[in-house]
Image (spheres, rainbow, N blue to C red):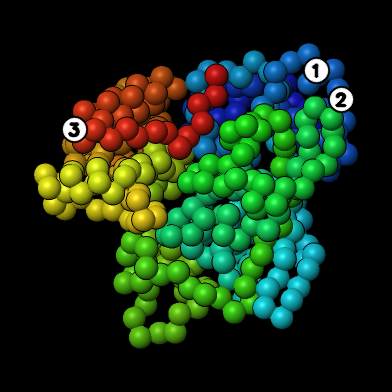
Amino acid sequence: MKIEENISIKDIHTFHLPVKTKWLAEYETIEELKQLLRSDLLKQNPFFHIGGGSNLLFLHDYPGVLLHSCIRFFRIVKETDTQVYLQVGAGVKWDDCVVYAVDNGWGGMENLSWIPGEVGASAVQNIGAYGAEAKDVIAEVETLEIATGDVRIFTTEECEYGYRDSIFKQSLKGKYIVTSVTFRLDKSPVFRLDYGNLRSALPQGEAVTLQAVRDTVIAVRRSKLPEPEELGSAGSFFMNPVIPVEKYEALKLHYPDMPCYPVDESRVKVPAGWLIDRCGWKGKSFGGAAVYERQCLVLVNRGNAEPMDIVTLSEQIRASVEETYGIPIYPEVNFIG
């Protein structure tokens, strides 16, 4: 366990904003987490759990304790002829988890390559990309209840997963801390290649492999997203809106090239990046914050942004999209403070 006081968190959240926390407490085991939850430090101060800091926007210095998991392990807990059940510590970097699966020939995570953050947050946020979501491979989520210190295992169904959503962001928000996630992976991978331009981006004339899909996803993501060392960002800032088919068909009469992806029989998902781009926001800025020139879903810190620069720019974009298309868009990023 390590507890630090009055430190900058510029380098532990991906927006790299000039903010501090009163305390940062890191733990390596469930027992250490239980000790922290029983401590006067947490009883007498507000606290908030962070992962890789990739989906957070701190509005100002945090006045309490930021908790961070350093529980890191890989463990096969079950195996069948067709599947492997892999338990992974919440503090493992998400992409390290994808690498582990791909290197072992286990399918299910490859489309989720190069997503920032940690394993614990993947189960809270239900991260997704290229037609895949974390819920597709999650078998169960191990947690610690904050109020009691008791361990509780959630099945995938009990997690109530939705688009970038889970029970941990809704009715159980702030009540449990994820300590590990067990993933159900396929020994004979079934590839998902029909989302976006993934299939056409794969090397032509070669066999499709887990590594080939991973490499292609990374190449596509890197062509659209800024390198974290170069520009601070939280990746995709906005969620893609889901709207009724009837509303989409009505909009398509006026905007024939508006793309969509089916969600179910009655709803479609419209790319927020397309909406923002068509409203003319690409490259626009406010203060030290800007819309990334290669991908309008991404807001970046050009090096001198203050938190309210990003908030103001995001609010201007939301108002513009809703005024133009009548479609509200919402941040995927969590505002802290």
Question: In the shown orientation, is residue 37 left or right of residue 182?
Answer: right
Measured Cα–Cα span from mark 1 to mark 2: 7 Å
Measured Cα–Cα span from mark 2 to mark 3: 51 Å
What type is the residue that disc 3 sits on? Thr
Of the pair 134 and 29, the residue shown nearer to us = 134
Dot 3 or dot 1: first in sequence order is 1
Residue occupying the point 12% across, 47% down = 253
What type is the residue that disc 2 sits on? Arg
Question: In the shown orientation, is residue 45 left or right of residue 248?
Answer: right
Rendered-image quadrant of the C terminus: top right
Residue 228 location (% of width, % of height): 47, 44
Question: In the shown orientation, is residue 298 left or right of residue 158?
Answer: left
Residue 324 — which label?
3
In this rendering, the label closer to the viewer, 2 or 3: 3
Which residue is denoted by mark 2 in the rendering?
Answer: 38
Residue 324 location (% of width, % of height): 18, 32
Q: Quadrant of residue 146?
A: top right
Which residue is denoted by mark 1 in the rendering?
Answer: 43
Q: Is residue 329 visible?
A: yes
Residue occupying the point 70% across, 23% down = 47
Measured Cα–Cα span from mark 3 to mark 1: 47 Å
Of the pair 17 and 189, the residue shown nearer to us = 189
* Callout 1 touching callout 2 (CB < 8 Å): yes
Dot 2 or dot 3: first in sequence order is 2
